[in-house]
Image (cartoon, rainbow, N blue to C red):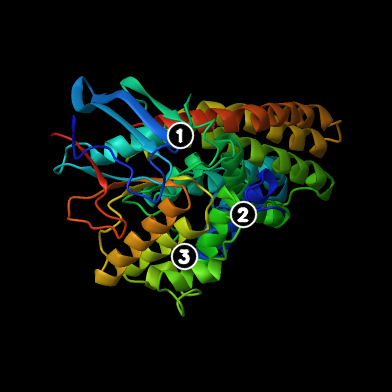
Amino acid sequence: MDFLGIPRNNRRMPASAEPPILLEARALSFSRQDEPVFGPVDFALRAGEIALVEGDNGSGKTTLLRVLTGMLRAGEGEVLLDGLRFSLDTMAGAVVFLGHHLGLKFDLSARENLRVSAGLYGLRADADADAALADTGLAGFEDEPVRRLSAGQKKRAALARLLILPARVWLLDEPYANLDRDGIALVNRLLDDHANRGGAALVTSHGAVSFAGGEPRRIRLHA
Amino acid sequence: MTPGSTPAACAALLRRDLTLAWRRRGDIAMPVLYALIVATLFPFALGPEPQLLARIAGGVVFVTVLLAVLLSLDQLFRADIDDGSMEQLMLAPQPLALLVGMKILAHWITSALPLIVVAPLLAGMLKLPAAALPALVMALGIATPLLSLLGAVLVALTAGSRRSGMLLALMLLPLCVPVVIFAAGAVAAAQEGLPWIAPIAWLGAGLVMAVVLAPLACAAALRIAMDT
């Protein structure tokens, strides 16, 4: 495990007052049947920081994210959320996870799916489901069953969830998959807004990504 | 209700599952149709003597309804696991056990409740004396949620494996037996004019215990199933 690029904070924050660490991994590693999948990994994600997890296929990017959500038990090391060891019971909606499976019900419309998410996770103070759908380019498709949307539109419907949930830490697994050029720009804009609001995000990708706010931090996993 | 509060989360999930079930109404009709067919076939197979039918009616209705409920049980968590909704439920701020409980409730409403509604009709087709009807409906009303809860634990335990149907059936059999004995016992007692509240009370005690423990066991089993 090494960092390519110095861990830095490229947001508009004075260097003297380091923003608080939201998510921290200490010597985190994971093995499946004694076969090491990744690690040990060390990193700290501060408020307003976006980090990119890089690695080849099979290097354990998705596994790392699932360990960070608490769904997979880490083999060694620990994960701290706001400086506290966490489990699925204590994280209380602070983390939102978007994986390969989008967590959308295909028989429900995008709006209904958002309503379910909002009911489960709560609604951000200034959030509005319809505005979020318009923002992600789904205006006019709000009441269409998700089943009838294209793969890219399904992804957008899942991304709309990020716009309304109050979670401070985003764990996005391949958020750029299936998206067109506009969609990629949309993800970058969402990440940028999130960072400016003081949130943090961990993004996996094997493609080149550029953020408006400058080069993101990179966390590299070796296969 | 504030979004994100526990009641709002329960309501949102219950509403989601009921809406999904309503969008696939044909699937709800399946168990009812199945029960109707089975209850129709019995008089043809055994002969139409009212005394014989009346004697077996209670048992037949029970076994039919319980099997019909089990038909759909296998799918309880499968869709949610496949489309990633289960991950979203696990990461939600509410206790997973509570959310799983809501899913079981939704399953009971969509699969067992229609069967309880048609049960008097099935009993009528099999010449069950009208005096035994209250016992039948009450026993079903308690036995079906009990079975849904017990079944849900086993479904959660086998959720990790793809072909869980056979295993599920094998594991569920011993759990079904006491439920059927008490429920059919209550109806038989009512048919003979005996007090029938005692077996119902036993079922009720089982239900209370299952309501408390089954969602917790389900949540723990699902966490293990997702931990792969």
Element type at marker 3?
loop
Q: Looking at the figure, which quarter contains the C terminus of chain B? A: top left
Residue B90 placed where, x, y %? 48, 39
Residue B27 position, x and y percent, is 50, 60
Q: Which mark is residue A107?
A: 3
Badge 3 crowding class, 10 Å Cα cut-off, few under 14, some 14 to 19, many 20 or more, is some
Which comes before the other along the chain, label 2 or label 1?
2
Q: CA distance from mark 2 to mark 3?
A: 15 Å
Other-residue count near label 1 (Cα within 10 Å), few / some / many at <14 / 14–19 / ≥20: many
Amino acid type for the residue under numbered disc 3: Asp
- Residue drawn at x 83%, y 31% is B197
Chain letter of mark 2 equals B
Circle 1 sits on which residue? Answer: B222
Q: Are marks 3 and 1 on the same chain?
A: no
**Type of amino acid under label 1:** Leu
Q: Position of residue B21 (x, y in %)?
A: 55, 60
Amino acid at the residue labelled 2: Ala
Q: Secondary structure at mark 2?
A: helix
The residue beneath circle 2 is: B12
